[in-house]
Structures are given as C-alpha cells and as structure tokens.
Image (cartoon, rainbow, N blue to C red):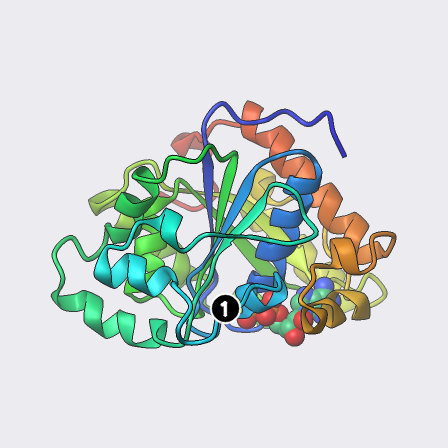
Amino acid sequence: GEGLPRPDRTRIMVVANQKGGVGKTTTTVNIAASLALHGARVLVIDLDPQGNASTALGIDHHAEVPSIYDVLVDSKPLSDVVQPVRDVEGLFCAPATIDLAGAEIELVSLVARESRLQRAIQAYEQPLDYILIDCPPSLGLLTVNAMVAGAEVLIPIQCEYYALEGLGQLLRNVELVRGHLNPGLHVSTILLTMYDGRTRLASQVAEEVRTHFGDEVLRTSIPRSVRISEAPSYGQTVLTYDPGSSGALSYLEAAREIALRGVSVHYDAQSSPLGH
Ligand code: ADP
Ligand code: MG
C-alpha cells in the first residue's frame, strides 16, 4: 500500500453523526488503519467516553491510563497520552477513558471550552498526515471541540430507512461552528456504511444520499460484513484481522479516495448541496 499522495499539511477529519450505531467508530479506526497502511502517519483521537475506538485499536484505556480527558480538562500535552497502535506502522491513538463522560459538564466552566482540543493539537509537534476524531453520538461540547479543531467533517451514513433523519441537526451544527468558531469547517466526505446491495431499500437510500450530497459521497460504500464487526473484539481493525475480506478491501479503497480527493477537491460554498 504505497504510492498515495500525502497531504501537504495535516488533514483533520471529524467523524460525526449524532445517531449511534451508524459506523462512526468502525469507520474512524478502519480508515485510519487504511491510510497508515497506504504509508501515511495517522492519529486517532477517541472522543467518545465509551472508548470503542481505543478498544478496537487494542489500546489500553482503563481508568488510570493518561487519556484525552486529561488533555481536555487538565491541559496535559497530547504527546503525553498518545500511544502507538501495535501491528500498524504509523498509526497512533489518543485513548478515551470513562472519565471523559464527565468532561461534557466539566468543560462548561473552563476557559476556551470549545477550543481546548484545537489548542492541544496545535501544540503537538510530531508530524502527522491525518488526524481522525471519533465523536460521541451527541452534539455537545466534545463534538464542538472536534469541529473547532478540524477542517473536514466525515459523516458515516448507515443505509437504512431513517438514514437522513437527524442529519439536518448535524448540518446546522456544522454551520453554527463554521459561522462562529471555525470558518474553515465543511462537510468533505460522506461514507455509506453497512451497505447491503441486495436490498432495494439500501440502494434507494444510497441514491437519495447521492442526490442530496453529490460529490461529497465517496464512490466506495462499505458492505455489511461479519468480519468488520468481529475485529474489535480482537483489538484489531479489519485490515489486520482479515486483510483479504471485502470489508478490509472496501475500507482501503475508501481511504484511497479520501487521500486522492484531499489534494484536488477544494470546498466551494457556491456549489454546496447543503443549502446555504
Ligand atoms: P457508532 O460509532 O456510530 O456508534 P459503530 O462503528 O460502533 O457505530 O458500529 C455499530 C455496530 O455496527 C458495531 O457493533 C459495529 O461492529 C457494527 N458495524 C459497523 N460497520 C459494520 C459493517 N460494515 N458490517 C457489519 N457490522 C458493522
Ligand atoms: Mg462509536
């Protein structure tokens, strides 16, 4: 996996959708591992108190482990909490521990509460090609911190009946953060997940998403695959758990699209399908 262009500066992608179970975490860890296998240096920031991304990357995240909570609430340097992911060269993780559940409240009374993650990332000196931030299934201060820190929003959409419901709220939040806190923020990437091409519903939803979002939607969609859902219980991404599986190949291809687009696609508010 070589030969992909590397971005000229760190691309920070916020993986968000306030709906749970749509594939945010799965997408974060597998796209991150795919980019690393393509030769990039990649950091996953686990911003969900559940710590599912940390688990899936085989990173220890019991309560005493230095974590993203310490970075956000106690201003600990990011470099103090980042751990290398074993088995995948160039892949790193800033884990989440359960105390992150309290951060949503604790952040409220802190100075610069929306930009604490941004500051921590700016102070991080290790060279990185990508940072992927796995958001919790809510639009609170943790997600806002991610949206202030990043430029790109990656929205995984599960191909099911209510797929587009609730997206309006997410898009409005992106607009709010763009307007008030981070003018560079935009939805750069939509990824269809758990796609079952045999069902009429899945292809209808995919069609609807493509009509609504146009070029932001990756051509590659991620199939529903047992191998993808098994991998986290082994502390692995599907890329090392079953490298030849359809799930692994589709994430590699989606990552390739992301890498290739990053160098050529520039955001144009005029042609945005998001209606502003
Ligand atoms: P979120 O982070 O949005 O809550 P997850 O990534 O945790 O969603 O995915 C929800 C569940 O669906 C998990 O059990 C995960 O293993 C499973 N899953 C995600 N993507 C796929 C897929 N392509 N095929 C099969 N199962 C999947
Ligand atoms: Mg998750």
Q: Taking 272 as reference, is 148 above or below it?
A: below
Q: Residue beneath label 1, please?
A: 165
Q: Nearer the viewer, residue 175 or 233?
A: 233
Which residue is drawn at the image coordinates 30% and 62% (left, top)? 70
Q: Is residue 182 visible?
A: yes
Specify the amino acid type for callout 1.
Glu
Q: Is residue 22 visible?
A: no
- Which quadrant of the rendered structure holds the N terminus? top right
Which residue is at the front of the view, 124 or 271? 124
Q: Quadrant of the C terminus?
A: top left
- Is 268 rendered above or below residue 116? above
* Left or right, residue 88 beside residue 65: right
Residue 209 at x, y percent in the picture: 61, 54
Residue 275 on image: x %, y %: 40, 45
Q: Residues within 10 Å of mark 1 (few under 14, many from 20)?
A: few
Q: Nearer the viewer, residue 126 or 37?
A: 126
Q: Secondary structure at mark 1?
A: loop
Please identify the quarter of the rendering in which residue 261 is found. top right
